[in-house]
Image (cartoon, grey):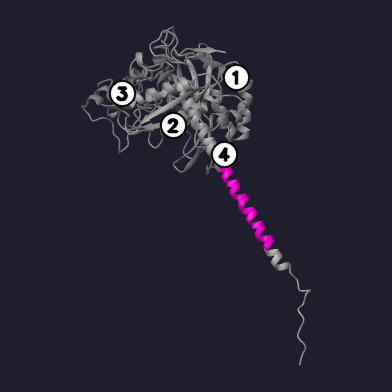
Amino acid sequence: MAAATEPDTTAPVSAPRNRAVCSLLFWIKACAAVLLLLGAMALLSYNVWRLHRNAILGLNNPIIIVPGSESCTYKNNGLARLEPPVQRLMYGFALDWKNDTPSAISQRLNKIAPAVVNAWIRFDNNGFNGQSTSDINWFGYETSLLGRGTMLELTMLPIVEMSTLTTATLTNIAQICADINSKYAVPILLRFGHEMNGNWEPYGQRPSAYVTGFRNMGTILRKYTNLTAMVWAPNIGTFYPYAVSSSQQLPPAGSVDFRLLDTNSDGVIDAADDPYGPYYPGDDVIDWVGLSLYWYPETGVSSVPRPSTYVHDSILAAGPSITPLVSANFNATLHNFYNRFALGKNKPMCFPESGAPYIRNSTTTNVVEELEVKQTWWQQVLSPSNLAAFPKFKLAINFEESKVQDSYIQDWAQTFNPIVRNAFINDLTTKYKDSLIWGGSMDFACDGSVAMT
């Protein structure tokens, strides 16, 4: 009978031990991952709470606004609300707030703070078209992070005809502006219903309702704050009345609006008519006047703004860059925006949006460099000869975004490409150092006055 086999006491026991170690490591890593996730969620929650707290409480040094008080009453001393008392130009940027902030652009500019930043808000009587009051407050809060001395331009676009806007809607806007003015010490340039002389917005080329709506907004605003200025800003009228689309025609012949726009009473609305006057709401409700001004190259081709007087000529509606573009019946006197509304009415003038684009996906082989396109533009806007010729020209805002139009990527930004940005900063700090106003160099009072610091 075969002997019983003795158990092999030398058999390896490492496999169960390895499994135990692996299991322990797994649970350690799992717990660490959970802790990291909880930590990230806690940090996110804290940041949301901090932003909400700041949006509610504002700054430690707010501007106290007491409507109707002597100290907060606008003094008509020859300067408009929020007009700097010096003959220098404020420079700012219209931001893509989904991807950019005032602090970020200041960092890109080596800590130079913009004098003004722009935000876009579409609205009707139901609210802000997907945005909220908190979002608008956030624009004010983010602007305040640059420190006292930067203004916020709010471009408010009705997505309905002006005649449908209620008193409650306009009152809400006025109260939001006053809240930002006080809580964050941030003045607002309220660009209300801009480019009303064009046909691309629901309220466009409807002067009777537009004038009433703008006047209503301005009248209500004054009950709450003088730290928000009303900005009246049509589109540059060189090609007025623009190409009429099939979805939005000029007012019907014989209507009140048609008669208002047919300023020479010849039965036709064309280049001989006044592109601005029918839409002017009145001196008493307008603080600033402005024009949207861009350089538009040929479709899909990057090109340098030509001639070198393009900006100058556009302001005056006359000169070598205007003459080849207009018809024989073009009325240059009526198109001279600066003389009529800045000089003639003693209003500070601005470019509330402007720029020259570089076409990123151009199919043209002899494309000019991005730097040449954009530097030529800002050098025209900031030209000392222009600033001397137009002393009421007090603000220019660059459209600091890219957008797709006709399948072409138009890049208008001056601060993202390092080559362009470095040249821009160099020009700002050398050539134009003494002719510009930046954030941090102004202080504001509740009566709407500006002091240089």
Label 2 Cα crowd, 10 Å radius (few <14 / some 14-19 / many 20+): few
Quadrant holding the C terminus: top right
**Residue 359 at least partly seen:** no
- The disc, 1 or 3, on the residue closer to the chain's N-terminal end is 3
Q: Which residue is mark 1?
A: 432
Element under disc 3: helix
* Foreground residue among 151 and 91: 151
For the residues labelled 1 and 4, say whether their Cβ atoms are less than 8 Å apart.
no
Residue type at mark 4?
Leu
Q: Circle 2 sits on which residue?
A: 134
Span highlighted in magenta in the image:
20-40
Residue 344 place in picture, x, y as percent: 39, 11
Q: Nearer the viewer's eye, disc 2 or disc 4?
A: 4
Question: For residue 126, which quarter of the picture?
Answer: top left
- Amino acid type at circle 1 is Tyr
Query: Picture coordinates of residue 137 (x, y %)?
Result: 45, 28
Q: Residue tagged by mark 4? A: 43
